[in-house]
Amino acid sequence: MSKSSNPLLNMTEALGHVEFQEGRPNESFESTSLPGFKLALEGRRAIREYDHQPIPENIMRDCLSDATLAPSSSNLQTYELYWVRDPDKKELLAQACLGQPASTSAGELIVIVARVDLWKINLEKVIDIMTQGGANPLPGPVDDYYHKIVPMIMKNDVFGINNLIRRAIYWFKGQSEPTIRTPVNQCDHRIYGHIQSSLVAQTLMLSLAAHGYESCPMGGMDKLRIGKMLNLPRKAEVSMVIAAGRGKPEGLYGSRVRLPESDLVKVV
Ligand SMILES: Cc1cc2nc3c(=O)[nH]c(=O)nc-3n(C[C@H](O)[C@H](O)[C@H](O)COP(=O)(O)O)c2cc1C
């Protein structure tokens, strides 16, 4: 594939490389961050019963802030985190989580919402941040990526015309070279949204664990009721609810069960 036809290669060239930064992973991490990371990773379990006590606000805010460091496709950050603190709303939310013990006993409940519908607004905001309000234009290929390629990939309409056009282009282009294949239907757009949300959810749970708190992701819930309760627009979609707080010993329902690693990890 020629360089000029691959916007990702052109963009890499235009951006160049930033200087090595102190906080980026390097060999010293193995002795500094790895032990703590393993503690948080291995310590995180799905905990179903809590002591009802809220997590201190500064800690919750730090965890939520950490969650936003999750990567997202084209950095569009098409998700929202709803930290539900209002007691009435919290009760409604627990009911919408089918009254699961994690939802009724957790000190905190956070709803992770996929907001693919915000892609265009977020794109404009990201460009605005990167260009300092337009003062520093992006290098040509980067500008092309954000102003042409991303809209080409993300554009959606009620009649599915953009999806049909993409499907035709990708099929045609894909005959002769590696080509992205999605999104070309509504389902792809929804998957896109849940991918971003899931990364945010896991980052949040790991941060909670690193702060000494436990959590439980909940997919067993009534998305429609939660959407209504949060006044979400029709195109927003609830991905998951995270229960968090100080877990009770009886909230751990059993020892960790994992399939043999050979079933899950394939080296090819
Ligand atoms: C998307 C998703 C949805 C889940 N939904 C629920 C749920 O509704 N209720 C629940 O008790 N646990 C739920 N879980 C937790 C899983 O059951 C749990 O992560 C799994 O059994 C592995 O246990 P571990 O997280 O302790 O390693 C969910 C997990 C994920 C990732």
Image: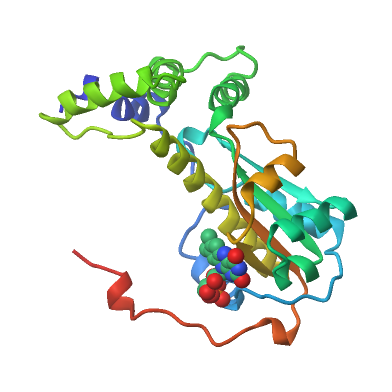
**Residue 38 visible in image:** no
Foreground residue among 85 and 28: 85
Judging from the image, the colouring scheme is rainbow
Residue at the left extreme of this rendering: 176
Residue at figure coordinates x 68%, y 63% from the top left: 98
Question: Residue 165, percent across and down?
Answer: 29, 18
Question: Residue 226, percent across and down?
Answer: 70, 47
User: In the rendered view, would you say 240 is above or below 78?
Assistant: below
**Image check: 33 left or right of 18?**
right
User: In the rendered view, would you say 137 is above or below 268?
Assistant: above
Residue at figure coordinates x 57%, y 15% from the top left: 136
Question: Residue 204, percent across and down?
Answer: 64, 57
Q: Quadrant of residue 113?
A: top right
Residue at figure coordinates x 75%, y 60% from the top left: 95
Q: Quadrant of residue 78?
A: top right
**Residue 172 visible in image:** yes
**Image check: 58 left or right of 264?**
right
User: In the rendered view, would you say 196 is above or below 8?
Assistant: below
Residue at the right extreme of this rendering: 87
